[in-house]
Image: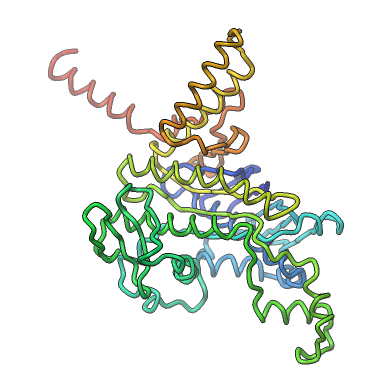
Amino acid sequence: MATIQIQHIGALTDTGEVFVKRVTLILGPQGVGKSTLMKILCYCRWVEKVIMKDPKTLSQYRTEDYFIEELRSFYRFDKSFFSEQSHIIYKGDILEIDWSQLGGCSITLYRKGEKERLRHTPKIAFLPAERNLISAVPNVDKSYRSNVRDVLFNFIFEFDEAKQGYDAEHKLSLSVSPHLFYYNQQGADLIWHEQQEISMEAFYAASGIQSAFPIDVFSAYLYKQVGERYTISLHEVVSLLKGFFPNRQPTEYTGEELSQALDGVPLVYSSMQLYIEEPEQNLFPASQRDLTLRLLQMMSTVKKKEIDAEPKPHPSSLVFTTHSPYILSVINTQLAVVRARMDLLDNSEGLSGEEQKKRLAELEALQKKYKLDDIDLTSDEYAAYFVEEDGTLKNLIDSDFPMVSGVDLDGVSDWVEDYTNEVYQIAYGR
């Protein structure tokens, strides 16, 4: 799995080394740099993917300012986010990126044999906080204008691709309600209510549905892509051929030369990497729970597809920012299941063999009761970090007792209790 460290960019002063796991949470109050961290991580993963597909692009990213200017323009970072102390250290699957404001960008590939063995092609998507614009603004795909292909333009463009698999005959169930389904009809986003047997344009749907259905559509799309062959573009083919035969014109390449250029290029999506800003947006707590559980189920079941896609499986990853104590609590329920199963298997309570089997069976029955028996993530596959107001990060998962601490997330309950006690002291003398 990848790691990243960011120093002096935006509100971040020094994140320390952040480990990206199959499920990674980034928590903290507004304005401390949660999205900045996730955007830079996603960008580095994307740069690595570009270089894995076409190693000839490596020299481009090593060019002065190219790496950082691409980051700035795509994620709309103001120049004030960066200073002479700004620094990014990313360690990925086949390369390391070390960028600093004063030193430029150094990209180091792992040794050749290792690099070729680890080379693969993930399917990556970033879902911004503005994702409800695709339904809240009519024809946003035609009306949104940008001088460059920024994060919002890219999201709108890729969503149009992701939704193509759904129509009136092939609807996608939505996580926020068992009775709601999504489908696409001639480019229009429609929500179908199964019980009432009516459909409406997403433009008229509740704000929570507008925020959640793009997550369902994108996650299902990425999940389907793992293990599937992808089409290499003509531009990518020509770029590869130029790398192998720089003095030839495209019309002069032979079939044998084309095969040579494509040899070793991974043409199957090895994994999915999904980045989501605040999945809880506009959602009732129960809907936050259902959306979170669906994402955890997806990150479990995609493991089998990863094995089928590559001889050496590459783990998928889900990274998201959140303020929600409900999402945190839902994840802790599944970590509790993991811990309970481990303790029962280790028989730390000294149970008889019969009692041990009985309790393990009861635990599995509980998961089936709630239809969560397909969640199969170990505690090592979770990571959670809290971004402090001073721009540093704190690991929220205790390795000895694997649960995500929510103490830092809830700064309101103590205030409410203290304030109420003062009111009662005045009114009742107690």
Q: Whole-percent x and y of residue 382?
A: 57, 38
Q: How is the image coloured?
A: rainbow
Total labels: the figure holds 0
Indicate left or right for 199 with 64 as reference.
Answer: left
Q: In this image, 149 relative to 213: left or right?
A: right
Quarter of image, res 47: bottom right
Residue placed most toward the observer, 147 or 423: 147
Q: Residue furthest left?
A: 427
* Displayed quadrant of residue 412: top left
Residue at (66, 81) in percent of width and height: 234
Where 343 sits versus 203, above or below? above
Residue occupying the point 56% across, 40% down: 393
Image coordinates of residue 253 in percent, x first then y, are 80, 87
Q: Nearer the viewer, residue 125 or 45?
A: 125
Could you tell me residue 145's position as x and y percent? 42, 78
Q: In the figure, is residue 305 to the left or right of 419?
A: right
Q: Is residue 169 above or below residue 4?
A: below
Judging depth in this view, the residue of 211 and 408 nearest the camera is: 211
Q: Measured along the vertical axis of the image, is residue 257 above or below residue 126?
A: below
Which image quarter holds the C terminus? Answer: top left
Q: Residue at the spot x=24%, y=63% of the render? A: 204
Q: Quadrant of residue 102?
A: bottom right
Residue for point 52% across, 38% down? 375
**Residue 403: x and y, percent?**
52, 28
